[in-house]
Image: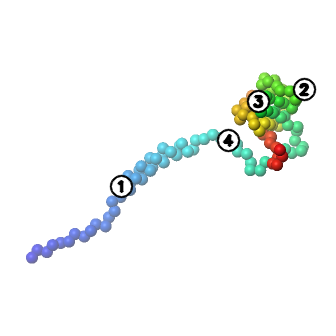
């Protein structure tokens, strides 16, 4: 009599589909990793703002009002507006004679954001190494 031989089941896992999936994931990570590391370098503000020290020099304050007019707290006519070129020349003169003078920007609550950025650009052009922002204390209206 012929006896039938039974085949034993193969207990091996086919890993080829897993290798395919891993290669696809590797390609995706290789493409996206350089994109994640690019960015813009910024200096983030500290969590708690503190006022200027009382011994610090009198800051140079450039102000932009709601209509976009610039003011500077230096020289004659502090209450009258100045144009961009006058602002740049006055700030450059002050910083040339007193380079450690802090430069601050004060913007009206309703001013266009672009006007504040334009003022900061003008101050940078005048030679200000860094510019601080002035705000009202909380609760003050």
Quadrant where the N terminus is found in the figure: bottom left
Task: Mark 2 or mark 1: name the one nearer the start of the chain.
Answer: 1
Image: 74 above or below 50 = above
Quadrant where the C terminus is found in the figure: top right
Task: Mark 4 or mark 2: name the one nearer the start of the chain.
Answer: 4
Query: Residue 42: where, in percent of width, then height?
Result: 68, 41
Cβ–Cβ below 8 Å for labels 4 and 2?
no
Q: CA distance from mark 1 to mark 3?
A: 64 Å
Determine which residue is flagged by label 1: 17
Please report the residue visible at 87 percent of the width from the left and 41 percent of the height from the top.
56
Q: Which mark is residue 76?
A: 2
Crowding near the residue tagged with mark 4, few <14, some 14–19, many ≥20 C-alpha atoms within 10 Å:
few
Can the viewer see residue 100? Answer: no
Secondary element under disc 3, as helix, strand or loop, is loop
Query: Residue 63: where, in percent of width, then height?
Result: 81, 33
Please report the residue visible at 28 percent of the width from the left and 66 percent of the height from the top.
10
Task: Mark 3 or mark 4: name the one nearer the start of the chain.
Answer: 4
Please report the residue visible at 77 percent of the width from the left and 39 percent of the height from the top.
109
Determine which residue is flagged by label 3: 68
Q: Which mark is residue 42?
A: 4
Please report the residue visible at 75 percent of the width from the left and 37 percent of the height from the top.
110
Secondary element under disc 1, as helix, strand or loop, is helix
């Amino acid at each position: 009599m012929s006896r039938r031989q039974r085949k034993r089941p193969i207990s091996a896992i086919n890993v080829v589909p897993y290798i395919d999936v891993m290669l696809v994931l590797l390609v995706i990570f290789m493409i996206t990793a350089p994109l994640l590391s690019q960015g813009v370098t910024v200096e983030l503000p500290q969590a708690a703002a503190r006022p200027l020290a009382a011994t610090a020099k009198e800051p140079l304050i450039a102000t932009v009002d709601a209509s976009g007019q610039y003011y500077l707290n230096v020289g004659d006519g502090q209450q009258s507006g100045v144009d961009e070129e006058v602002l740049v020349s006055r700030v450059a003169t002050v910083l040339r004679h007193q380079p450690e003078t802090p430069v601050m920007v004060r913007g009206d609550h309703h001013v266009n954001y672009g006007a504040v950025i334009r003022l900061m650009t003008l101050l940078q052009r005048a030679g200000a190494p860094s510019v601080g922002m002035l705000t009202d204390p909380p609760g003050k209206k």
